[in-house]
Each structure stands twice: as C-alpha cells, then as structure tokens.
Amino acid sequence: MKSICGTDCNSCSYGKNNGCRGCCSTNGCPFGKQCFIADYILTKGFKKYELFKAQLISEINDLNILNMPKIKELIPLNGAFVNLRYPLPNGKTIQLLDDNDIYLGSQVESEFKDNDVVKCFGILANVNFILICRYEENGNNPELILYKKRK
C-alpha cells in the first residue's frame, strides 16, 4: 500500500486487519474518512505540510509541560491506537478521538521517575487541537494533561 505522506502502511497491522487499502488508492480516505494529512498535502503541497508539522512541534514544545521532554518528530497515527479512555471525576470514562481518524503524534518518556513506574506522555494533534496525556505502560492509568484548540 502506498501513502500520500510517505508513511510505511505495510507495517500497520491495524490497517491490514481492518480493510485499509492505503490512502493513495482511496484518495486520502484510508479508513473511510478524509485523512487531514493527505488532504493537507493534496491541497497545499508536501513542503507546506512539513512547515505545518514544524510549527505544530514548536507550539507543543512552547507549552512547557512539566517533566515532558521536547519532542522532535510527529508521525501519523491511527485513532484506534491512541484513543484512550480518560477517567472523569464522576467515575465514568470518555474518549476524545475517533478510531477512524489519523492524527499526528508522538510518545516520550517522562523526565520524572516515580520509583519503578515508567510514565510516558502521549502527544496528539491535528489542524484543530493539541492533546497531551500521561500514562503508564500499555496506556494504563491515562491522565489528560491538556486538550487545547489551535488558533
């Protein structure tokens, strides 16, 4: 499968198991919805997309989240991989993403060490928002740190 953004779709087991035909053969709709990355590249070009990603990385790093190291790269991620259930004060949980959307994201290990518990920050974004969460191994005990609309 070929992608518009250059991602290696052949290494994605989720796509293979869920009927993804890649974004080149679907005109940027690998999971039935328009991928914002493919749309961005098709309408504005790859160079503008790279500039957009650089701006997004700068915005995320400028947030100065406590114990979160600076990120260097954002990669396309399918929502099904990153759509965690965040606990609410009333005991219920909420998911903020769409399993069939593609987001730009990254994972970095927290600079703060809590005994033997390794915590990571998950960073997700698109043209409309930035989401930052913290969680333990395998996405356990997720905590929403920031959900911010972009200007």
Image (spheres, helix red, strand yellow):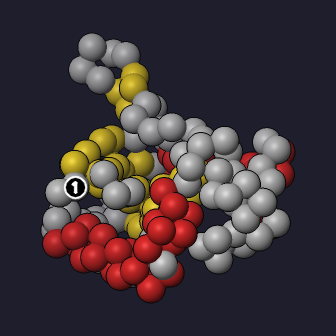
In which quadrant is the C terminus drawn?
bottom left
The answer to whether residue 19 is above or below residue 2 is above
Please state which of residues 53 and 89 is positioned toward the viewer in this rendering. 53
Where, by quadrant of the figure, is residue 7 drawn? bottom right
Which one is nearer the viewer's eye here, 19 or 32?
32
Q: Residue shown at 73%/65% (left/top)?
A: 24
Residue type highlighted by circle 1: Arg
Question: 2 or 133: which is nearer to us?
Answer: 2
Q: Position of residue 89 (x, y in %)?
A: 24, 20
User: Residue 10 appears in which quarter of the rendering?
Assistant: bottom right
- According to the image, label 1 marks what residue? 150
- Is 77 left or right of 118, judged from the image as shown? right
What secondary structure is marked by label 1? loop
Residue 117 visible in the displayed image: no
Percent x, y for residue 79? 55, 46
Count of numbered badges drawn on the protein: 1
| Viewer-side residue, 26 vs 9 | 26
The residue sitting at 29% across, 51% down in the picture is 129
Q: Residue furthest bottom?
A: 47
> In the displayed structure, does residue 94 sit left or right of residue 100?
left
How busy is the neighbourhood of tag 1: few (under 14 within 10 Å), some, or many (20 plus)? few
The residue positioned 63% from the left and 58% from the top of the image is 28
Query: x, y percentage for residue 55?
Result: 28, 76
Q: Is residue 42 above or below residue 46?
A: above
In which quadrant of the rendered image does the N terminus lie?
bottom right
> From where the camera sits, is residue 27 visible?
yes
